Image (cartoon, grey):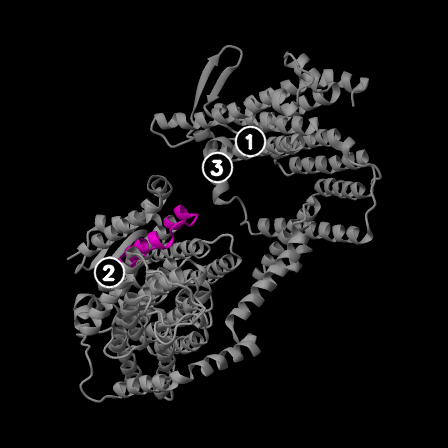
Amino acid sequence: MTPELPIVVLAVALPFAVAGATPLLFRALGERTGYAGAVVAVTCFGLLGTQYGSEGAVHLTWIPSLEISLRFYVDGWALLFALLASGIGALVFLYSSAYMHGESGLARYYAALLAFMGSIVGIALAADLIAIFLFWELTSLCSFVLIGHYTADDSSQYASRMAMLVTVGGGLFLLVGFLLLALVAGDALGPASAFDLAAMLENPDEMQTALRDEGLFLPVLGLLAIGAGTKSAQVPLHFWLPNAMAAPTPVSAFLHSATMVKVGVYFVGRVRPLFASLEWLVLFVTLGLTTMTVCAILAVASTDIKELLAYSTASHLGLIMAGFGFTSVLGAETGVFHLFNHALFKAALFLVAGIVAHEAGTRRLEDLGGLRHDLPITAVITVIVALSMAGIPPFSGFYSKELLFEAAVEASHVHDIGVLGWLYPAVAVFGSVFTVLYSLRFLSLFFGGRPDALEHVHRPSFALLAPPALLAVLTAIVSVDPEIAVHAIVQGGVDATAVDTHEMHVGLPTSYSPAVGMSAVTIGSGFLAYPFYGRIHGGIRAIQRTRPSLSANWWYDAVVGNLTGSGVWLASRVHNGLLRTYATWTLGTTCALALAGFAATATIVPAELVDIDAPAAIALVLLVAVMAGIAVVLSTSHIAGILTLSILGFMIAIFYILASAPDLALTQLVVETLVLVIFLLVIEEIPEYYEVGLGRVARDAALSVAVGATAFVTVLVTTDARPDGRTAIARYYAERAVPEGGGTNIVNVTLVDFRGFDTLGELVVVALAAISILTLIMMREGGEDE
Amino acid sequence: MTTVIMRTTARAVVPIIFVVAASLFVEGHNLPGGGFIAGVLTTTAFAIIYLAFGLDFLERGVLGRDVDLGKETSRDRVVVAYRRLFEYGLAIAVTSGIVPLLFDRPFLTQTFVEFEDVPIYHHVEIASALAFDFGVFCVVVGGLLTILSVVGAE
C-alpha cells in the first residue's frame, strides 16, 4: 500500500499551522492551550496511524529547476519515529498544562513546542536531502527557544546558546555531507535523483560503489557522522545535552526521550543500508560505545536528578548508535528496539523527575529519599521504568541490551576487526555496569530513609500522573511480551534499517549464550558495587574537580570565551563608527582577495606587462592624467585639489574619445562636471587643515598603491583574456542593433532594448540611494528632536 | 559662490545646457547620448543655478513656487518635487516594460516605427524605448537632485 500524500502532508503541516495560530489560540483558551496542543498531537498520531503498513514515497513539487521537491517516504522506521514523536508529544502537552501552570510566556512555549514536534515528524518522514536539512535545523531553532524558555535565567540562556552552537554547527557539516552525497547520487542515479534519499535507499549498492569510486565514501560518512553525533550528543560533543536540562521539565522529557536528540540516531539508522561496511562499523561502534561508557560514568557523578537522567540519555543514545554501527541484522534490531524502549522509559522517568521536583521542591539527589510513602503511584511507575533502564530481566530494556551484547560478540564473525572483537563486548559490559548503578540510584529516591529536611510532599494531580503512568503501562506490556512490540512496529523499523531482512524474535533466554553471561556479569557487578555508590560518586567528582580540562564543557567555555574575546577585539578595530576605518578595511580586503585570486590562478604573467603598445596621443593624455594625479596629492588647498582631480577625470574622458568610445566619454564628462560642482558645494564644510600622523600617511599611501595596483592588474587581466577581433557578444549586438532596436548607437540600444532589465535594476539603485540619503538625514533630524 | 561672475556665467550657460541635454536625450538612440547622460547633464544645470543663486531662488524663480522660509528642506520643499520626479520616472520605466505584456510579448520588449517624408525632418523614427529612456531620465534627475539638495541643505 502506498502512502497518501494529503494525509502525510497534513500530519507534518498541522503542528506548524497551529503553532502559527498559537498567539490567537492562547488569547482564547489561556492555559488550556496545552490541551489544544495535545489534540493536535493526537490528530497527527491518528493521521500517521492511518498510514500504518504502507510503504513508499510521495512528493510535492517544490523547486523543480533544481530537482528539489518536498518528498516524503513512509515505511516502518519513519512511522515508528513519527508516531513516537507525536504520541509522546500528546502526553507532554497534557503534562505541560498542569506543570507549567501559572508560568509566563506560555504562548511562546506552546508555539515552539508545536513547531518542534512538527519538525521532528518532518525529519522522520522527509526523503529529500534539502527538506531533511530544513527540518533538521528547525528542530535546533525550536529547541533553542524551548531550552532558553526562562529568558531571565543566565544558565538557561547559556544552555540554549550552547545547544544552538553545537547542533547548528553540526548541521552545517551535515549540509556539506548532503551536497557531496547529492553530487554522487546525481552521477550514479541520474540528475532527477540527486536529492532523493528514497531513490538512494532503493539502490544502496550502486550508491556505495559510486561513493567509493569517487573517493568520497569516507568524507561523506565522516560529515554525516559529525552531524548525527552533534545532534545525538555523542562524545566529545555530549556536553550540551546535560546543560539542556535548564529547559522546563516537560521539554526535557520530550527533547531527551522522543525527539531532537534521537534525530541523530534515527538518521544513522535511515542511511545505514547505504553505508554498511567495515569503516561504518569501526566508526559508529567506537563512537557509540565510548559515549555510552563516558556518559554512564558521568551520570553516576551527577548530583541532580535531571542531570542524572540527561547523562543517562546520552549514554543510551551511545548504545543505540553502537547498535546501528554493527553491520549484522542484530545491530539493526538493537538500534530500533532500544530506540523504542528508551523513548518509553526515559520520557516516563523525566516526567517522574518533574513530579518529584514539582511536589518536593528540590532536584538534589542528596535531599531526596523514601518518597514511596508520599508518592505511591509514582513509585510503582518508577520501579517499572527504572528497572527497564537498568536492563534487568524481564523489563523491556533487558531485551534490547541483550541484543547489543549479541551483536558485539558476533561482530568479529562478520568482519575481521582483530582486537576490537573482544574489546567491544568488554566495553559494552563495563559501560552497562554504570547503567545499573545510576538506575538503582534513581530508584533509591523512593526507598530508604526519608531525609528530615524534606518538607511535606503533595500528591500530584491527575494530569501530571497520567502521562508517565500510561508510558509505564506500555513499558510493562513490552516487558511482559516483547513480541507484541516487535510485531506491531519494531519489525518494520528493522526491515528498513537492516541490509538483509530477518524475522526478529526476542524473549527471555532459555539456554546459556555469551550474551546471557555478559548480562549476568553486568547485573551482578552492578548490584555488588551499589553499596559503594557513594565512594564511586565521590571518586569521579574528585577527578572532575582536579582535572577540569578533561571535561568537554571546559573546552567549550575556553573556545567560546576566546572567540568572544577576539570578536570584541576585532570589532573595536573594524567596526568603530569611523567612515575611514570602514573604507580602509573594505578596500584593503578587496585588494587582498582580488590579488590573491589572480595569484592563485596564475593569471598574471609579469613578462607580458612590459610589452606595451600605445599610440603617442593616448600616451600623452594618460601622462597628463598621471601628472594631475600627483598634483592632487601635492596640492595645498582643497580647491586646487578638486580642480586637479577634474583634470584627471577629463583626461580619462579624452582617452575614451581616442579609444573610440564616445558614449563613455560623454558620460565621463558629465559625471565629472557634476562631481566637480558637488565637491565645490560641500568644500566649505571641510576643515581647512588637520594634523595627520606619519603612520596614517604611510598606511593610506600603501593602501592607495594597493588599490591602484589591483585596478591596474584587474583591467590588464580581464581585457587580456579577450580573443582577437570582436567577441560573439559584440558581433551579436553590432549586427542586431539597427534591425531590432532601430538605433545606430549600440550602447544606447543595448541599454534600453537588449538589456532593459539591467537598466531598470540600475534605476532602482539610483532611487534607493536617494531614498536612503533622505532617510538618513531625516533620521538624524528626528534624533536631534528627541 | 554667489559672485557676479558666477551669476552672469550661469545665466548664459544654463539654457545652453538644457538644450544640449534635450538634444542628447532625443538623439540618444542613434548618436552618443541617452536618458542617463541627459539626466546627469540636466542635474548639472540645476546644480549651477543652486550654486549661483541659492535654493530659494531655484524654488521661487525657476519653479515658481511659494516658499515658506522657515521650513526644513528635506520634508516640505524642493525635495518633495524631486522625490516625485524619480517616483514617476520609475513608474514610467516599469509601465513601459509592462505594456508589451498586454501584446503577449516578454517584459520590456521594445519596438520602433519609422516615418518617411515628414516636413522639415524628412525621416523620423520613433522608438518605444524612448518612453523607457524618459523614465531613466526622470529617475536620474530626481534621484541626483534629491541627494544634492538634501546634502546641500546640511
Q: What amino acid is at disc 3?
A: Tyr
- Quadrant for residue B3, please give it: top right
Residue depth check, mark 2 versus mark 3: number of the one nearer the observer: 2
Q: Residues within 10 Å of mark 2 (few under 14, many from 20)?
A: many
Residue bearing mark 2: A79
Residue depth check, mark 1 versus mark 3: number of the one nearer the observer: 1
Residue depth check, mark 1 versus mark 2: number of the one nearer the observer: 2
Q: What amino acid is at disc 1?
A: Ala
Residue A733, disc: 3
Q: Earlier in the sequence, mark 2 or mark 3?
A: 2
Q: Residue at x 47, y 54 (%)?
A: A150
Residue bearing mark 1: A767
Q: Nearer the viewer, residue A375 or A289?
A: A375
- Magenta-drawn segment: A85-110
Q: Where A779 falls versus A606 (above or below)?
A: above
Q: Where B111 falls versus A556 (above or below)?
A: above
Where residue A684 appears, x then y in whole percent?
A: 78, 31
- The quadrant of the image that shows the C terminus of chain A is top right
Q: Chain of mark 3?
A: A
Q: Earlier in the sequence, mark 1 or mark 2?
A: 2
**Number of marks in the rendered image:** 3
